[in-house]
Image (tube, rainbow, N blue to C red):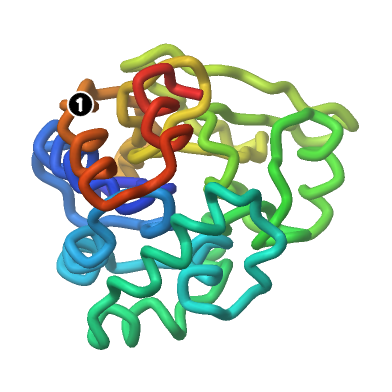
Amino acid sequence: MRILILSDIHSNLVALEAVLSAAGSFNALWCLGDTIGYGPQPNECVELMRQHAQIAITGNHDLASLGKIDLHDFNPDARKANIWNGSQLKEENRAWLDPLPPSIHVDRQFLVTHGSPREPIWEYLLMPDQAVANFEFFPNQVCFMGHSHVQLGFRMRSGSEHAERFLPDTGRTLELNSSTRYFINPGSVGQPRDQDPRAAYAMLDTANNSIRFHRVAYDVTATQRQMRECGLPVALIRRLEYGI
């Protein structure tokens, strides 16, 4: 089974459509949260996730756009974008987003969470010591997470007290070793922050127990034009071209 792993779409339909086109055929899609927020097309992105996602969780920007967490926890630009995103949502899309949890135990092997197992909404899992601490909070072999907008992974071998961080090259395939546990971040579809503006995603192949990391270029200027037309903050518009 080929499972498309997406996170942090952030209402960027142009990027999302580029990813869906580049991914080719897949049997399932797992969405790791922040489908909306920041970008210009929240309804269209939610509708594609309603169509394709077998598993979907919520993120902090989803919750903020829905008015379920305090908007003062966000910087002024993010706050403005979340208020705008929430105001645009159709009722059926709001109803789909509203009950989504921040993490799901898919099965004995896989956990999906937005931030981290110990803090599913807010923790940016970026450092090896964080990974070591978070392995204590779940029993599964692999945790897929988003939130940081950085395509990366951590692995810790059985019996080790240390986790190794790795930044995968585009097209790299990671073979899952049965004696190793993993954190995998597929990166952000709609707003990468690892100095690479291309949309990021990953493909899990359960037949050979592997994960392949991908990047795909999309028309950044089209998304920027849409954001300007919606009156979204200039800093959010500019950052897309730099991947920051």
Residues 83 and 180: in front is 83
Q: Tell me where residue 64 sits by quadrant.
A: bottom right
Q: Would you say 181 lies left or right of 105 here?
A: right
Q: Is residue 16 visible?
A: yes
Question: Is residue 173 placed above or below 61 in the rendered structure?
Answer: above
Q: Give 82 or 16, whichever is nearer the viewer.
A: 82
Residue 16, compared with residue 138, is above or below; it is above
Position of 244 with respect to 196 (left or right) is: right
Residues packed near mark 1 inside 10 Å, few (<14), some (14 to 19) or many (20 plus): some
Badge 1 marks a residue whose secondary structure is: helix
Amino acid type for the residue under numbered disc 1: Thr
The answer to whether 68 appears left or right of 6 in the picture is: right
Residue drawn where x is 20% and y is 43% of the image? 226
Q: Quadrant of residue 96?
A: bottom left
Image: 103 above or below 1? below
Number of callouts = 1
State the image coordinates of residue 94 (x, y, percent, origin top left).
Answer: 34, 81
* Residue name at image x 79 percent, y 49 percent: 134
Q: Residue furthest top?
A: 169
Residue at image location 56% in from the left, 17% down from the top: 167
> Which residue occupies 22% across, 21% down?
217
Using residue 152 as the reference point, say whether residue 33 is left or right of it: left
Q: Nearer the viewer, residue 108 or 94?
A: 94
Where is residue 9 shown, x and y percent of the image? 35, 48
* Residue 188 image point, x, y percent: 42, 38
Residue 7 seen: no
Q: Position of residue 62 (x, y in %)?
A: 47, 66
Q: Which residue is mark 1?
A: 221
